[in-house]
Amino acid sequence: MKTRLTTSAKVAARLLREGGTVAFPTETVYGLGALAFDAKAVRRIFIAKGRPDDNPLIVHIADRSQVSDLAQKIPAYARQLMDAFWPGPLTLVLPRSSRVPDVVTAGLDTVGVRLPSHPIAHEFLREVGAPVAAPSANRSGRPSPTSWQAVVQDLNGRVAAILKGSRSGVGLESTVVDCTGRAPVILRAGGVTLEQLREVVPQARSSSEEDRRRGRSPGLKHRHYAPRAEVVLTDTLPIPAPAHSAWIGIGASPKGVSFRRSCKDLREYAHEVFHFFRACEAKGIKKIYCQSIPLHGMGVALMDRLRRAAAGTAKLRG
Ligand code: TXA
Ligand code: MG
């Protein structure tokens, strides 16, 4: 398949409406979209990514009125969260409407919905004029793409088009919140923090062991975010820096590593991390040290990604 690179939201939307898969920028990471109500088109996403079919997709909309086509029984607290955080990096998991094909929700009775804030994403979704199912636009298991070049690396020749935009602002994916119970429960930490959610709905909480056992967030069990280098978490300096090693963190960087990225704060660390992983691959780095950070605010989402990247590359060790 020839992949078309374009800066035109109109062209990209036309190719998507014709049943193609189209990658597009959002404020979190780039997404790979298809018409949510077209099961055949959505299946092409799973093929392009090599994604396990038990992992549901988030449906993206341009306008809040579209929620009623996708979900039913929307609790009052979910509406408060929409008021506060949409458009933005928050996905709400709601009881699904029967119109949503099984392939989108992996057969669950819920659907994840998000209204992105990125201007190009917004223009693109408006041009499409219908809900767009979209996971992150990486090959399954790889770091999420935060630039169109990263999408090209993973999906060139496998998708109909890539809508080019600037680097993603947040750099980590949206916060996924289960809104089917009495209070919101975070299934995946992301761009909106627990502290921010609690300012609006004080009962909001992180998912417990019990929630995880019930398997409410199918995506968590799969391998994720792994570059072609070993990822190691570290909280002490200096580190043993073998040849072809790299480091990313906040503030003072260690001596001896061949490639480093010293960020000024947590926000910048989150913004840079997936980009850095891919830059390390390009340089032939074998081992990436990532500074551990405290579990507050965005630190929760970032540590989640780092731990899973480290687990995903653990087999490279030794
Ligand atoms: O920021 C983002 O969320 C990006 C951009 C493109 O919007 N998308 C993204 O999609 O990260 P993906 O497919 O890489 O991750 C979606 C996560 C997975 O962990 C999936 O299991 C979960 O959301 N999810 C989707 N629908 C769900 C549902 N109905 N119930 C529980 N979890 C759901
Ligand atoms: Mg993903």
Image (cartoon, grey):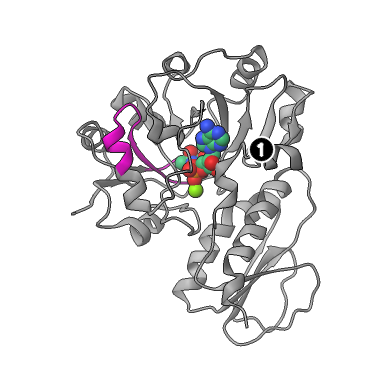
**Which x, y percent locates residue 81?**
64, 21
Front-most of 301 and 123? 301
Query: Is residue 18 shown left or right of residue 118?
Result: left
Q: Which residues are magenta?
A: 24-43
Query: Is residue 282 shown left or right of residue 164?
Result: right
Front-most of 17 and 57? 57
Q: Residue at x 72, y 47 (%)?
A: 300
**Which x, y percent locates residue 187?**
64, 38
Q: Is residue 37 magenta?
A: yes
Amino acid type of the residue tagged 1 in the rendering: Arg
Q: Secondary structure at mark 1?
A: loop
**Which x, y percent locates residue 21?**
29, 42
Q: Residue at x 24, y 57 (%)?
A: 157
User: Where, by quadrant of the figure, is residue 152 drawn?
Assistant: bottom left
Can you say whether 138 is above or below 63 in the image?
Answer: below
Note whether residue 208 is visible. no
Can you say whether 151 is above or below 58 in the image?
Answer: below
Query: Is residue 36 shown left or right of residue 4?
Result: right
Note whether residue 95 is visible. yes
Q: Which residue is mark 1?
A: 214
Q: Residues within 10 Å of mark 1 (few under 14, many from 20)?
A: few
